């Protein structure tokens, strides 16, 4: 990768949430303060919402890392569950094995555990990420859990974190009782242009830049224009631009490198009205850069021996994970939110683990990163990815292999 060229200790723009790289904009600092308030106030929920890529999960990880030892935490990330399965997941986080328990037993065990922790002077916190996926029935179970109390106070603190659709659910008539329990509600907006520039410099500094200016001054406004101040989009664009500079053996990122990255990603300017990135339709407006990009390879995604997806690989980056914001989504409990990425250059293709829980395996060996060769099979949980190098010469269908020898003789 480009670390040696840019004289950095680690990659500055990873997509995986890393508290070390958190940039506390005014928005993020306020959201973090709301989270911290749950430790001192037990009445009601705290709800944090934000668009995809706004930095919610990184905020959670930072908050958890700073908690005192007297706080017992259950963190739920898989939210597409039935009410009973959701309650069982909470118990699993607290160290129980509740899979054979019926719902009344699960509730009784939870109730007893919460009261015992309170008696022993410990605070219990439940954090639910991707909470917009919770059904109304599960949210009603959460409301009931929040009511467990001693003679003096509630014993369970609850933080719900999710995309803006969570607010729509909480505002519905069916959940009016739950909405009345919400004590604090905050929405993470995108960063300003000044915050975007500071965010980039902060991540580079943490990665080891020591104040060196790696991005040219005129790239910052363009990065903001195409990312809209969304942290994940900033990371994607900056990392791709650094790859473009690396391919030209330059230790600073110029506007030319940034424009090449925008072409590889096929992005148009960020639309502030929808707060979403819109992909440029190649068939309607192909650029000269996009037409020049050759297909380097292909991947076949399989599950149980059946191919479920095929994707061409051109220069750029492809992120694979469980959530919908990935380039390729694999909806499986064995796959992390952002599991791995495939970085394609004109002459090479690399797969890299993004600090996933279950890792990636090549030849039954867990690897951090691996240069893909034609025919390689990478294991991701219960899925497999086969890499096909389109640059590798292949015999024509129906051709006699001896024809090549005859041609050489001629």
Image: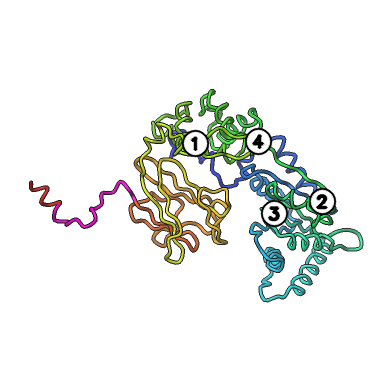
First in sequence: mark 2 vs mark 3: 3
Mark 2 vs mark 1, CA separation in Å: 44 Å
Q: Position of residue 196 (x, y in %)?
A: 62, 32
What span is colored magenta in the figure?
A: 389-403
Q: Which residue is mark 4?
A: 273
Query: Could you tell whether 180 is left or right of 291 in the image?
Result: right
Q: Quadrant of the N terminus?
A: top left
Label 4 secondary element: loop
First in sequence: mark 3 vs mark 1: 1
First in sequence: mark 3 vs mark 4: 3
Query: Could you tell whether 315 is left or right of 152 in the image?
Result: left
Mark 2 vs mark 4, CA separation in Å: 28 Å
Mark 3 vs mark 4, CA separation in Å: 24 Å
Q: Which residue is mark 2?
A: 182
Q: How many marks?
A: 4
Mark 3 vs mark 1, CA separation in Å: 36 Å
Nearest the eye: 52 or 126: 52
Q: Which residue is mark 1?
A: 8
Q: Residue at x 64, y 43 (%)?
A: 55
Q: Are marks 3 and 1 in contact (CB under 8 Å)?
A: no
Mark 1 vs mark 4, CA separation in Å: 36 Å
Above or below residue 254? Residue 303 is below
Q: Nearer the viewer, mark 2 or mark 4?
A: 4
First in sequence: mark 1 vs mark 4: 1
Mark 2 vs mark 3, CA separation in Å: 14 Å
Q: Which mark is residue 131?
A: 3
Answer few, some or many: residues within 10 Å of disc 1's Cα (few below 14, many 20 plus, some between 14 and 19).
some
Label 2 secondary element: strand
Looking at the image, can residue 112 be seen?
Answer: yes
Answer few, some or many: residues within 10 Å of disc 4's Cα (few below 14, many 20 plus, some between 14 and 19).
few
Looking at the image, can residue 7 be seen?
Answer: no
Label 1 secondary element: loop
């Amino acid at each position: 990768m480009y670390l040696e060229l840019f004289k950095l200790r680690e990659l500055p723009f990873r997509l995986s949430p890393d508290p070390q790289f958190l940039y506390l904009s005014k928005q993020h600092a306020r959201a973090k303060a709301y989270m911290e308030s749950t430790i001192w106030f037990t009445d009601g929920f705290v709800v944090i919402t934000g668009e995809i890529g706004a930095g919610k999960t990184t905020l959670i990880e930072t908050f958890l890392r700073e908690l005192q030892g007297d706080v017992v935490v259950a963190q739920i990330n898989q939210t597409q569950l039935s009410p009973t399965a959701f309650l069982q997941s909470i118990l699993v986080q607290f160290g129980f094995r509740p899979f054979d328990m019926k719902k009344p037993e699960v509730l009784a065990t939870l109730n007893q555990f919460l009261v015992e922790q309170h008696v022993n002077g410990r605070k219990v916190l439940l954090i639910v990420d991707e909470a917009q996926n919770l059904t109304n029935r599960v949210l009603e179970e959460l409301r009931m859990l929040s009511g467990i109390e001693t003679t003096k106070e509630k014993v369970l603190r609850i933080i719900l974190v999710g995309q803006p659709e969570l607010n729509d659910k909480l505002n519905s008539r069916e959940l009016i009782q739950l909405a009345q329990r919400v004590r604090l509600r905050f929405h993470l907006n995108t960063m300003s242009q000044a915050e975007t520039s500071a965010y980039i410099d902060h991540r580079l500094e943490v990665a080891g830049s020591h104040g060196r200016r790696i991005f040219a001054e005129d790239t910052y406004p363009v990065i903001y224009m195409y990312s809209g101040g969304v942290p994940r989009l900033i990371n994607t664009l900056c990392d791709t631009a650094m790859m473009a500079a690396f391919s030209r053996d330059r230790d600073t990122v110029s506007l030319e490198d940034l424009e090449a990255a925008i072409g590889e990603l096929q992005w148009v300017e960020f639309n502030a009205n929808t707060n979403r990135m819109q992909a440029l339709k190649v068939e309607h407006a192909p650029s000269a850069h996009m037409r020049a990009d050759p297909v380097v390879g292909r991947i076949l995604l399989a599950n149980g021996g059946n191919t479920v997806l095929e994707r061409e690989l051109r220069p750029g980056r492809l992120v694979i994970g469980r959530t919908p914001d990935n380039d390729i989504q694999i909806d499986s409990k064995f796959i992390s939110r952002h599991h791995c990425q495939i970085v394609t250059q004109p002459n090479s293709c690399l797969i890299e683990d993004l600090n996933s829980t279950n890792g990636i395996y090549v030849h039954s060996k867990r690897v951090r990163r691996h240069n893909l060769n034609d025919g390689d099979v990478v294991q991701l949980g219960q899925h497999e990815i086969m890499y096909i190098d389109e640059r590798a010469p292949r015999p024509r269908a129906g051709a006699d292999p001896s024809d090549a020898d005859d041609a050489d003789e001629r």
